Amino acid sequence: MMELQFKRHRRLRQSANMRALVRETVLHKEDFIYPLFIVEGDNIKNEVSSMPGVFQLSMDRLKEEMDEIVKLGLKSVILFGVPVEKDAEGTGAYHNHGIVQQATRFIKGQYPDIVVVADTCLCEYTDHGHCGVIEGNKVLNDPSLDLLAKTAVSQAEAGADIIAPSNMMDGFVAAIRRGLDEAGFIDVPIMSYAVKYSSSFYGPFRDAADSTPQFGDRKTYQMDPANRLEALREAQSDMEEGADFLIVKPALSYLDIIRDVRNEFNAPVVAYNVSGEYSMVKAAALNGWIDEKAVVMEKLTSMKRAGADLIITYFAKDAARWLSE
Ligand code: PBG
Protein backbone atom coordinates (compact mmCIF):
# COMPACT_ATOMS: atom_id res chain seq x y z
CA MET A 1 0.00 0.00 0.00
CA MET A 2 1.23 3.53 -0.82
CA GLU A 3 2.25 5.65 2.15
CA LEU A 4 -0.07 8.61 2.71
CA GLN A 5 1.84 11.88 2.50
CA PHE A 6 0.57 14.68 4.67
CA LYS A 7 1.60 17.30 7.23
CA ARG A 8 0.84 16.89 10.94
CA HIS A 9 -0.43 20.38 11.88
CA ARG A 10 -1.96 19.03 15.05
CA ARG A 11 1.55 18.59 16.51
CA LEU A 12 1.52 22.28 17.42
CA ARG A 13 -1.93 22.15 19.03
CA GLN A 14 -1.37 19.38 21.56
CA SER A 15 -1.51 21.36 24.78
CA ALA A 16 -2.42 24.80 26.04
CA ASN A 17 1.23 25.69 26.50
CA MET A 18 2.19 24.43 23.05
CA ARG A 19 -0.61 26.52 21.56
CA ALA A 20 0.57 29.54 23.53
CA LEU A 21 4.08 29.10 22.09
CA VAL A 22 2.86 29.34 18.52
CA ARG A 23 0.13 31.95 19.04
CA GLU A 24 0.53 34.72 16.48
CA THR A 25 -1.83 37.34 17.84
CA VAL A 26 -2.07 38.41 21.46
CA LEU A 27 -4.33 41.10 22.91
CA HIS A 28 -3.03 43.59 25.45
CA LYS A 29 -4.84 46.18 27.53
CA GLU A 30 -2.69 48.78 25.79
CA ASP A 31 -4.46 47.94 22.53
CA PHE A 32 -7.77 49.40 23.63
CA ILE A 33 -9.26 52.87 23.52
CA TYR A 34 -12.47 53.22 25.54
CA PRO A 35 -15.24 55.55 24.31
CA LEU A 36 -16.98 57.85 26.80
CA PHE A 37 -20.16 59.85 26.25
CA ILE A 38 -20.21 63.03 28.32
CA VAL A 39 -23.51 64.85 28.82
CA GLU A 40 -24.32 68.24 30.27
CA GLY A 41 -26.12 68.30 33.60
CA ASP A 42 -25.64 66.98 37.13
CA ASN A 43 -25.54 63.51 38.55
CA ILE A 44 -26.39 61.76 35.29
CA LYS A 45 -25.48 58.17 34.61
CA ASN A 46 -27.91 57.00 31.95
CA GLU A 47 -27.51 53.57 30.47
CA VAL A 48 -27.90 53.73 26.69
CA SER A 49 -30.87 51.45 26.06
CA SER A 50 -29.41 49.95 22.88
CA MET A 51 -25.96 49.55 24.48
CA PRO A 52 -26.21 47.71 27.81
CA GLY A 53 -23.23 48.55 30.01
CA VAL A 54 -22.53 51.86 28.23
CA PHE A 55 -23.57 55.09 29.97
CA GLN A 56 -23.99 58.75 29.25
CA LEU A 57 -22.16 60.45 32.11
CA SER A 58 -22.25 63.97 33.44
CA MET A 59 -18.97 65.62 34.44
CA ASP A 60 -19.57 64.99 38.14
CA ARG A 61 -19.92 61.25 37.50
CA LEU A 62 -16.79 61.05 35.38
CA LYS A 63 -14.45 60.53 38.32
CA GLU A 64 -15.92 57.16 39.32
CA GLU A 65 -15.74 55.99 35.72
CA MET A 66 -12.15 57.15 35.30
CA ASP A 67 -11.12 55.51 38.57
CA GLU A 68 -12.49 52.23 37.25
CA ILE A 69 -10.77 52.67 33.89
CA VAL A 70 -7.42 53.35 35.53
CA LYS A 71 -7.84 50.45 37.93
CA LEU A 72 -8.51 48.09 35.04
CA GLY A 73 -5.25 49.17 33.45
CA LEU A 74 -6.65 50.92 30.40
CA LYS A 75 -4.48 53.70 29.01
CA SER A 76 -6.68 55.66 26.69
CA VAL A 77 -10.20 57.03 26.24
CA ILE A 78 -11.96 58.72 23.33
CA LEU A 79 -14.43 61.44 24.24
CA PHE A 80 -17.79 62.24 22.67
CA GLY A 81 -19.84 65.21 23.85
CA VAL A 82 -23.62 65.29 24.10
CA PRO A 83 -24.62 68.94 24.57
CA VAL A 84 -28.06 70.23 25.55
CA GLU A 85 -28.03 73.12 23.10
CA LYS A 86 -27.46 72.59 19.39
CA ASP A 87 -27.37 75.03 16.51
CA ALA A 88 -26.90 75.11 12.74
CA GLU A 89 -23.11 75.51 12.88
CA GLY A 90 -22.43 73.23 15.83
CA THR A 91 -20.77 76.04 17.79
CA GLY A 92 -20.79 73.88 20.94
CA ALA A 93 -18.09 71.74 19.34
CA TYR A 94 -15.47 74.49 19.54
CA HIS A 95 -16.63 76.34 22.61
CA ASN A 96 -13.85 76.84 25.13
CA HIS A 97 -16.12 75.43 27.82
CA GLY A 98 -17.67 72.84 25.55
CA ILE A 99 -18.42 69.46 26.98
CA VAL A 100 -15.43 67.62 25.51
CA GLN A 101 -13.11 70.49 26.42
CA GLN A 102 -14.30 70.38 30.04
CA ALA A 103 -14.03 66.62 30.27
CA THR A 104 -10.55 66.74 28.73
CA ARG A 105 -9.37 69.34 31.27
CA PHE A 106 -10.76 67.23 34.09
CA ILE A 107 -9.19 63.97 32.93
CA LYS A 108 -5.80 65.48 32.11
CA GLY A 109 -5.82 67.27 35.47
CA GLN A 110 -6.66 64.20 37.53
CA TYR A 111 -5.20 61.40 35.39
CA PRO A 112 -2.33 63.01 33.47
CA ASP A 113 -1.03 59.69 32.10
CA ILE A 114 -4.30 58.72 30.43
CA VAL A 115 -4.15 59.41 26.70
CA VAL A 116 -7.18 61.50 25.83
CA VAL A 117 -8.42 61.21 22.26
CA ALA A 118 -10.94 63.88 21.29
CA ASP A 119 -13.45 62.93 18.63
CA THR A 120 -13.65 65.93 16.34
CA CYS A 121 -17.00 66.17 14.60
CA LEU A 122 -19.98 68.46 14.43
CA CYS A 123 -22.91 66.03 14.29
CA GLU A 124 -23.48 65.94 18.05
CA TYR A 125 -23.59 69.75 18.09
CA THR A 126 -25.62 70.61 14.99
CA ASP A 127 -29.41 70.86 15.24
CA HIS A 128 -29.70 69.06 11.88
CA GLY A 129 -27.40 66.24 13.00
CA HIS A 130 -25.07 66.37 9.99
CA CYS A 131 -21.31 66.36 10.33
CA GLY A 132 -20.81 69.67 8.51
CA VAL A 133 -22.64 72.89 7.77
CA ILE A 134 -25.61 72.65 5.43
CA GLU A 135 -27.19 74.71 2.69
CA GLY A 136 -30.65 73.43 1.91
CA ASN A 137 -30.21 69.68 1.87
CA LYS A 138 -26.52 69.79 0.98
CA VAL A 139 -23.66 69.23 3.38
CA LEU A 140 -20.98 71.75 2.39
CA ASN A 141 -17.39 70.60 2.38
CA ASP A 142 -15.06 73.59 2.52
CA PRO A 143 -17.03 75.78 4.95
CA SER A 144 -17.05 72.84 7.37
CA LEU A 145 -13.26 72.63 7.40
CA ASP A 146 -12.73 75.90 9.31
CA LEU A 147 -15.14 74.77 12.00
CA LEU A 148 -13.37 71.45 12.34
CA ALA A 149 -9.97 73.10 12.62
CA LYS A 150 -11.37 75.43 15.27
CA THR A 151 -12.80 72.45 17.14
CA ALA A 152 -9.49 70.60 17.02
CA VAL A 153 -7.57 73.63 18.30
CA SER A 154 -9.98 74.14 21.20
CA GLN A 155 -9.65 70.46 22.09
CA ALA A 156 -5.85 70.69 21.97
CA GLU A 157 -5.99 73.83 24.13
CA ALA A 158 -7.98 71.83 26.67
CA GLY A 159 -5.17 69.26 26.71
CA ALA A 160 -6.31 66.56 24.29
CA ASP A 161 -3.40 64.26 23.43
CA ILE A 162 -4.79 63.12 20.08
CA ILE A 163 -7.28 64.71 17.68
CA ALA A 164 -9.60 62.24 15.94
CA PRO A 165 -11.61 63.89 13.15
CA SER A 166 -14.56 61.75 12.14
CA ASN A 167 -16.66 63.85 9.83
CA MET A 168 -15.30 62.66 6.46
CA MET A 169 -15.12 66.05 4.75
CA ASP A 170 -12.42 66.10 2.08
CA GLY A 171 -9.30 67.87 3.30
CA PHE A 172 -10.11 67.62 6.99
CA VAL A 173 -6.69 66.32 7.92
CA ALA A 174 -4.94 69.12 5.98
CA ALA A 175 -7.17 71.77 7.54
CA ILE A 176 -6.78 70.43 11.07
CA ARG A 177 -3.02 69.94 10.73
CA ARG A 178 -2.63 73.54 9.58
CA GLY A 179 -4.91 74.79 12.36
CA LEU A 180 -3.03 72.87 15.04
CA ASP A 181 0.38 73.93 13.74
CA GLU A 182 -0.59 77.58 13.50
CA ALA A 183 -1.83 77.45 17.08
CA GLY A 184 1.46 75.92 18.21
CA PHE A 185 0.25 72.34 18.64
CA ILE A 186 2.83 70.83 16.34
CA ASP A 187 3.16 67.78 18.57
CA VAL A 188 -0.51 66.85 18.74
CA PRO A 189 -1.10 63.87 16.45
CA ILE A 190 -4.12 63.30 14.23
CA MET A 191 -5.90 59.96 14.36
CA SER A 192 -7.97 60.23 11.23
CA TYR A 193 -11.17 58.36 10.62
CA ALA A 194 -9.64 57.86 7.21
CA VAL A 195 -11.85 55.01 6.10
CA LYS A 196 -15.33 55.45 7.47
CA TYR A 197 -18.21 53.66 5.85
CA SER A 198 -21.79 54.81 5.74
CA SER A 199 -22.77 51.97 7.99
CA SER A 200 -25.99 50.77 9.58
CA PHE A 201 -23.90 49.58 12.52
CA TYR A 202 -23.77 53.16 13.93
CA GLY A 203 -27.42 53.13 15.02
CA PRO A 204 -26.90 52.61 18.76
CA PHE A 205 -24.15 55.26 18.84
CA ARG A 206 -26.57 57.78 17.46
CA ASP A 207 -28.87 57.00 20.38
CA ALA A 208 -25.97 57.47 22.78
CA ALA A 209 -24.68 60.66 21.17
CA ASP A 210 -28.04 62.01 20.04
CA SER A 211 -26.58 62.57 16.59
CA THR A 212 -29.07 61.07 14.15
CA PRO A 213 -29.31 63.20 10.99
CA GLN A 214 -32.65 65.04 10.94
CA PHE A 215 -32.96 64.60 7.18
CA GLY A 216 -31.31 62.37 4.60
CA ASP A 217 -28.29 60.25 5.43
CA ARG A 218 -24.50 60.50 5.44
CA LYS A 219 -23.92 58.84 2.08
CA THR A 220 -22.43 61.91 0.39
CA TYR A 221 -19.56 61.95 2.86
CA GLN A 222 -19.23 58.48 4.35
CA MET A 223 -18.18 55.61 2.11
CA ASP A 224 -20.22 53.02 0.27
CA PRO A 225 -19.81 49.61 2.02
CA ALA A 226 -19.39 48.05 -1.42
CA ASN A 227 -16.07 49.78 -2.06
CA ARG A 228 -12.56 48.63 -1.35
CA LEU A 229 -10.24 50.60 -3.65
CA GLU A 230 -11.87 53.80 -2.50
CA ALA A 231 -10.67 53.01 1.02
CA LEU A 232 -7.09 53.10 -0.23
CA ARG A 233 -7.67 56.46 -1.92
CA GLU A 234 -9.13 57.88 1.30
CA ALA A 235 -6.27 56.55 3.41
CA GLN A 236 -3.68 57.77 0.94
CA SER A 237 -4.89 61.35 0.93
CA ASP A 238 -5.08 61.38 4.70
CA MET A 239 -1.49 60.14 4.88
CA GLU A 240 -0.41 62.83 2.43
CA GLU A 241 -2.24 65.46 4.46
CA GLY A 242 -0.44 64.42 7.63
CA ALA A 243 -2.47 61.78 9.46
CA ASP A 244 -0.50 60.00 12.20
CA PHE A 245 -2.96 57.13 12.69
CA LEU A 246 -5.51 55.63 10.28
CA ILE A 247 -8.88 54.46 11.55
CA VAL A 248 -10.97 51.89 9.70
CA LYS A 249 -14.60 51.88 10.76
CA PRO A 250 -16.61 49.70 11.38
CA ALA A 251 -14.30 46.79 12.14
CA LEU A 252 -15.94 43.42 11.94
CA SER A 253 -17.52 43.57 8.50
CA TYR A 254 -14.42 45.37 7.22
CA LEU A 255 -11.54 43.12 8.27
CA ASP A 256 -10.45 42.93 4.63
CA ILE A 257 -10.12 46.70 4.57
CA ILE A 258 -8.09 46.71 7.79
CA ARG A 259 -5.70 44.26 6.14
CA ASP A 260 -5.51 46.31 2.94
CA VAL A 261 -4.74 49.49 4.86
CA ARG A 262 -2.16 47.71 7.02
CA ASN A 263 -0.40 46.32 3.96
CA GLU A 264 -0.44 49.58 2.04
CA PHE A 265 0.49 52.22 4.64
CA ASN A 266 3.11 52.58 7.29
CA ALA A 267 1.13 54.13 10.12
CA PRO A 268 -0.61 52.67 13.15
CA VAL A 269 -3.97 51.26 12.08
CA VAL A 270 -6.93 51.60 14.40
CA ALA A 271 -10.05 49.45 14.14
CA TYR A 272 -13.24 51.05 15.42
CA ASN A 273 -15.38 48.23 16.80
CA VAL A 274 -18.59 50.24 16.54
CA SER A 275 -21.78 50.43 18.54
CA GLY A 276 -23.90 48.04 16.48
CA GLU A 277 -21.16 45.43 16.66
CA TYR A 278 -21.26 45.81 20.44
CA SER A 279 -25.04 45.73 20.75
CA MET A 280 -25.44 42.55 18.73
CA VAL A 281 -23.07 40.66 20.99
CA LYS A 282 -24.62 42.10 24.14
CA ALA A 283 -28.13 41.19 23.01
CA ALA A 284 -27.16 37.63 22.18
CA ALA A 285 -25.23 37.31 25.43
CA LEU A 286 -28.14 38.64 27.51
CA ASN A 287 -30.31 36.01 25.87
CA GLY A 288 -27.84 33.34 26.82
CA TRP A 289 -27.27 32.46 23.18
CA ILE A 290 -23.51 32.90 23.11
CA ASP A 291 -20.56 32.81 25.48
CA GLU A 292 -19.92 36.57 25.69
CA LYS A 293 -16.35 36.48 26.91
CA ALA A 294 -15.26 33.93 24.31
CA VAL A 295 -17.03 35.74 21.48
CA VAL A 296 -15.69 39.17 22.42
CA MET A 297 -12.11 37.96 22.74
CA GLU A 298 -12.37 36.13 19.42
CA LYS A 299 -13.73 39.25 17.73
CA LEU A 300 -11.04 41.53 19.15
CA THR A 301 -8.33 39.02 18.25
CA SER A 302 -9.64 38.87 14.69
CA MET A 303 -9.32 42.64 14.37
CA LYS A 304 -5.72 42.55 15.50
CA ARG A 305 -4.99 39.56 13.29
CA ALA A 306 -6.45 41.50 10.37
CA GLY A 307 -3.84 44.18 10.99
CA ALA A 308 -5.17 46.58 13.59
CA ASP A 309 -2.61 47.92 16.05
CA LEU A 310 -5.26 49.51 18.24
CA ILE A 311 -8.98 48.95 18.78
CA ILE A 312 -11.55 51.52 19.83
CA THR A 313 -14.11 49.37 21.60
CA TYR A 314 -16.99 49.55 24.08
CA PHE A 315 -15.73 46.16 25.28
CA ALA A 316 -12.44 47.67 26.51
CA LYS A 317 -13.34 47.45 30.20
CA ASP A 318 -14.70 43.90 29.88
CA ALA A 319 -11.70 42.79 27.87
CA ALA A 320 -9.25 44.36 30.34
CA ARG A 321 -11.02 42.51 33.14
CA TRP A 322 -10.90 39.22 31.25
CA LEU A 323 -7.22 39.69 30.36
CA SER A 324 -6.43 40.06 34.07
CA GLU A 325 -8.19 36.85 35.08
C1 PBG B 1 -19.59 60.93 14.52
C2 PBG B 1 -19.32 59.52 14.82
C3 PBG B 1 -20.15 58.40 14.62
C4 PBG B 1 -19.50 57.33 15.22
C5 PBG B 1 -18.30 57.80 15.74
N1 PBG B 1 -18.19 59.15 15.46
C6 PBG B 1 -21.52 58.24 14.08
C7 PBG B 1 -21.82 58.56 12.70
O1 PBG B 1 -20.98 58.78 11.85
O2 PBG B 1 -23.04 58.64 12.48
C8 PBG B 1 -20.05 55.92 15.31
C9 PBG B 1 -19.47 55.09 16.36
C10 PBG B 1 -20.21 53.86 16.71
O3 PBG B 1 -21.20 53.46 16.07
O4 PBG B 1 -19.80 53.25 17.69
N2 PBG B 1 -19.42 61.33 13.24
Image (cartoon, rainbow, N blue to C red):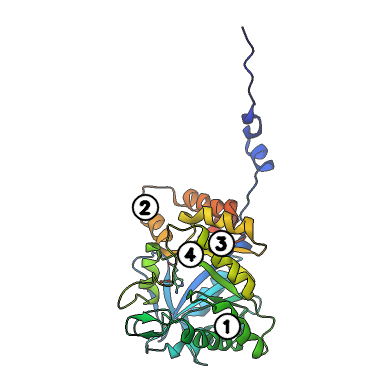
Give left or right: position of 192 versus 284: right
Q: For the residues carrying marks 3 and 4, which lies nearer the camera in this image?
A: 3
In the image, taking residue 20 as reference, residue 130 lies left or right, namely: left
Q: Residue furthest left?
A: 215
Relative image position of residue 213 (x, y in whole percent):
34, 76
Q: Is residue 26 above or below residue 79?
A: above
* Residue occupying the far top of the picture: 1
Q: Nearer the viewer, residue 44 or 244?
A: 244
Ligand 1 lies under 8 Å from the Cβ of mark 3: no
Q: Which residue is mark 4?
A: 314
Q: Amino acid at mark 3?
A: Leu
Q: Residues within 10 Å of mark 2 (few under 14, many from 20)?
A: few
Q: Marks 2 and 1: which is nearer the front?
A: 1
Q: Is mark 2 within 8 Å of ligand 1?
A: no
How far from the left and from the top, in percent, is residue 176? Answer: 58, 82
Specify whether residue 51 is in view: yes
Residues 77 and 229: in front is: 229
Q: Position of residue 263 (x, y in %)?
A: 63, 55
Mark 3 nearby-residue class (10 Å; few <14, some 14–19, many ≥20): some
Q: Earlier in the sequence, mark 4 or mark 2?
A: 2
Counting residues from the N terminus, which is met first, the one under dot 3 or under dot 4?
A: 3
Judging by the rendered image, the residue that carries numbered circle 3 is 232
- Label 4 lies in ligand 1 vicinity (Cβ under 8 Å): yes
Q: Which residue is mark 1?
A: 175
Sequence-wise first label, 1 or 4: 1
Q: Rounded to the nearest whole Å, what is the CA distance between mark 4 and mark 2?
A: 16 Å
> Mark number for residue 284?
2
Contact flag, marks 3 and 2 (Cβ < 8 Å): no
The kind of secondary structure element at disc 3 is helix
**Could you tell me how many numbered marks the image carries?**
4
Residue 308 appears in which quarter of the rendering?
Answer: bottom right
